[in-house]
Amino acid sequence: MADILEIKKVSKTYNSQSDNPVIALNDVDLNVAEGEFVSIIGPSGCGKSTLFNVIGGLIDDHEGEVLIEGRPVDGAHKDVGVVFQEESTFPWRSTLDNVAFPLEIEGIDKDEREELARKFIKLVGLDGFEDHYPAQLSGGMKQRTAVARTLAYEPRIMLLDEPFGALDEQTRMLLGDKMLEIWAALNQTMLLITHNITEAVQLSDRVVVMSYRPGTIKEIIEIDLPRPRSSEVISTPEFGTYVGKLWTLLREEASRGMVDEEAAIAAT
Amino acid sequence: MSRLHKMPILVGFVGLLVCALLLEVAVDIGWVMQLVVPRPSDTILAFPEVQADMDLFGNFFVTLGMTAGATFLALIIGIPFGYFLWRKTEYGVAYEGWLAAAFAAPTVLLYPLFLVIFGRSHATLIAMGFIPGAIPIIIQTRQGLLGVSKTLLNVGRSFNVSRRDLFWKIQLPSAVPTIFTGIRIGVMYTLVNIVAIEYLIDFGGLGRIVSEMYFRFDTPGTYASIIAVIFVSVFFYWGFGKIEKWLRPV
């Protein structure tokens, strides 16, 4: 399948004018095919979220370029939707109004946008909770609301920035299954940031392993497990092999990150 | 506990009734001096007397109207000014400390100055109510807008929201609880200042009735008119609570 996303030599340095510049990304190259599910894993501080912000057009002062179907990304745009790691539903809006938000911004009339919003609410399994407010929902339901809201935007590429990071392991696995259902139903291109190796293997076609600062792509692992897939795949020996391989790659980077973090704390 | 949560108004009334009964007994057996605190039953009986003598009900609406006028002025000036201090960071940083300091000042003591400017009129009451009301609204509007979650702003940006929509659909609703905290504090200080000035300049409203009853040594009448002031406060607290609930349902 043709590449929908091309990331070419992207670098980003924070505090570049100061004495202690932080190189978050260094010469990152990555191509993603349409309909592909790609996970990005790496230790904290490896620039994963920065990479997402660059792809989403939320950071523009970077080097290199990001192309979507050959067109360069310049600011936030309709082709990319983001689901954030932190609590991102609007507390003052019901589930229905949260999901309908991007459609409201696009000026779609109320009846049509509510009909569309209901479709995506059903897709994430929240039908019956349309009139509930985020404060009345569990953490997993809030994140599903955020997923439905981004889906309602109908982006070509969906960026999932550790959306289930704050949830317990069982909920995370079940929501992983839900994401796979959605992905299969919509043939949506998805990029997922996660710290969780199991989640990355469970969901992805490819897993991109990033190095600790400066963030570069250390290795890309193809996950050749049969589709359709569900969380039951974790009990297979092949799954364990992939998890082991990824941990070996990550271990060294995570150790470097930990040492660096401890040194920074000791210096304060 | 869950029953209490389901019937907060009823529980509140029952608690008040129990306190009133205990006070009634305490005054009756002499633990509390009747000259200082009347029996609650005497205070209730004083309402029709104060109404007949001083038009308590009419003056309730005078104080309510003055407070509403001063609060309205505080809102239409305070919220835009708070917004300005948020937008222009350097002004916000420069003036917020001064505003907070000014809020602690006993502005009620400026009333002779305002009497000179506006005369013994409603304008003096509104001006004196406006000052302490506007300051917390300004400060809390700025704080509310500063406190909008970065993630929510990024959500808006990721949907390519215009600056106007970002403000009206994300920043303002997000800041509503903090702004309403400022409004609630402001309206209480406005009411206190207005009643105090009514008391001091003997110019209508509940403050004047409190003053009249006090100087007549009519303790139940004094308490009855103070309770009427509390009802004004309850009205605004309830009203702004309803508006906030309408703007931010949960």
Image (cartoon, grey):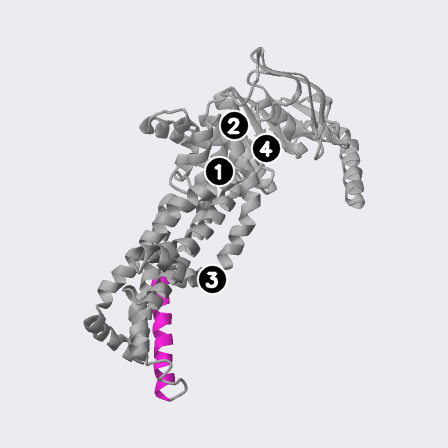
Q: Chain for mark 1?
A: A
Task: Give the residue at x 39% y 62%.
Answer: B112
Task: Evaluate if marks 1 and 3 touch, with contact meaning CB atoms under 8 Å apart.
Answer: no
Q: Where is residue A262 in the image (x, y as percent from the top left)?
A: 78, 42
Residue B158's disc is 2
Which sits earlier in the primary sequence, circle 1 or circle 4?
1
Disc ID at residue A231 = 4
Name the chain under label 3.
Answer: B
Look at the numbered disc 1 and give the secondary structure of its residue.
loop
The dominant secondary structure in magenta is helix
The label nearer to you, 2 versus 3, is 3
Residue in the image at 49% along x and 60% along y: B105
Check chain identity for marks 2 and 3: say if they share one. yes
Query: x, y (%) of residue B218?
Result: 29, 79
User: Mark 1 belongs to which amino acid?
Assistant: Thr
Kind of residue indicated by mark 4: Ser
Alpha-carbon distance for marks 4 and 2?
30 Å
Magenta stretch, residue numbers: B7-29
* Element under disc 4: helix
Q: Mark 1 points at which residue?
A: A89
- Relative to B64, B104 lies left or right: right
Pinpoint residue A164: horizontal percent, then vertical percent.
Answer: 58, 37
Callout 3 secondary element: loop
